[in-house]
Amino acid sequence: MRITVNQIKEMKQKGEKLAMLTAYDYPTAKIIDEAGIPLILVGDSLGMVVLGYESTIPVTMEEMLHHTKAVVRGAKRAMVIGDMPFMSYHISADDALRNAARFIQEGGAQAIKLEGGVTVMEKVARIVRCGIPVMGHIGLTPQSIHQFGGFIVQGKTPEAAARVLEDALALEEAGAFAIVLETIPTQLAQIITAKLSIPTIGIGAGIHCDGQVQVINDILGSYTEFVPKHAKQYAKLTDIISKAVTQYHNEVKAGAFPTEKQSYSIDESLLAELTK
Ligand code: KIV
């Protein structure tokens, strides 16, 4: 049985911390799911850590759906959340609803996430009314980096902090089941977390959030072009992969791979027939 929105909300009431990780493919989703992590986000961070774009902005609905389907095949128990890419929910409320529905109907996800607070409140309410659970995302919203002038901590002045709080309250009112708080001061995240009845899931928002989310490549050390301050590397996969690839290359050049162990043979009598 898959994790439900109600179970996620109950975890906050019980004071149970929530872990969420991103995934973009079948094998990674399977590992995360088997580790018992309840929430898997198919983030549009896909664009940077998998597809090699400089930001999340070029990511398309088709790319997101392609990867969402793979993640859904790998995760049997976790709730899979599809991340609405840039301009898939900005142009009109109809567009927002149609694209949210594609994540559920075509992608097989159980919920969607979108960036913004007060400005997207009406769209969130409409999507929720149609039966699609919505996770909000406020603070440093990467689809707006050109407006922010880069990956900069948000909510640092009293006015900016008040705006982030207002966004959080608007999303709760609109029916969001949880909210990602990205790169805001710990104290602001603590205030927001205390004011909301729905869970906050922090990334660079300190210890007081109800849960935490990380980009899988950041914690595994498999994307090293930009490692954010909030990421902790639990492994260094680039080193392991690079060592394995180099060893394979050397063995092929030296004629040391493959050995008998990686080779197939046919019956000697058949061979005699062939070489007659
Ligand atoms: O795209 C993503 O991976 C995200 C997380 C960082 C929350 O939005």
Image: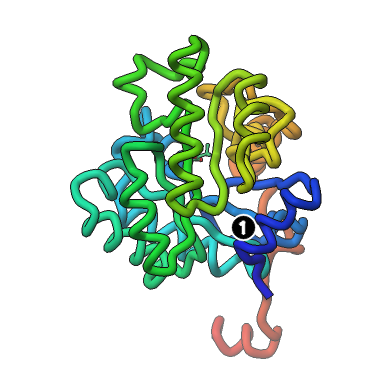
Residue 97: x and y, percent?
30, 60
Looking at the image, residue 168 lies above or below residue 263: above
Name the foreground residue: 56 vs 182.
182
**Could you tell me which quadrant the N terminus lies in?**
bottom right
As drawn, is 85 to the left or to the right of 8? left
Q: Residue at x 36, y 45 (%)?
A: 121
Q: Does the rendering let one see residue 231?
A: no
Query: Which residue ends up furthest to the top in the rendered image?
Result: 157
Q: How is the image coloured?
A: rainbow
Q: Residue at x 67, y 68 (%)?
A: 77
The residue singled out by tag 1 in the image is 29
Of the pair 175 and 56, the residue shown nearer to us: 175
Residue 263 rendering spot, x and y as whole percentages = 68, 66
Q: Residue at x 74, y 61 (%)?
A: 34
Q: Is mark 1 within 8 Å of ligand 1?
A: no
Tag 1 secondary structure: helix
- Can the viewer see residue 262? yes
Quadrant for residue 212, please give it: top right
Task: Provide residue 244's location: percent of width, then percent of height.
Answer: 68, 40
Position of the C terminus, as image quadrant, is bottom right
- Residue that lies at the very extreme toward the left in this rendered image: 91
Q: Is residue 106 above or below residue 11?
A: below
In this view of the protein, which residue sits in the foreground, 67 or 52?
67
> Is the residue marked by circle 1 packed among few (<14), some (14-19), or many (20+) residues within 10 Å?
many
On screen, residue 257 above or below 55: below
Percent from the top left, x then y, of residue 136?
47, 44
The kind of residue tagged 1 is Ala
Residue depicted at 67% across the width and 27% down the height: 190
- Total number of numbered discs in the rendering: 1
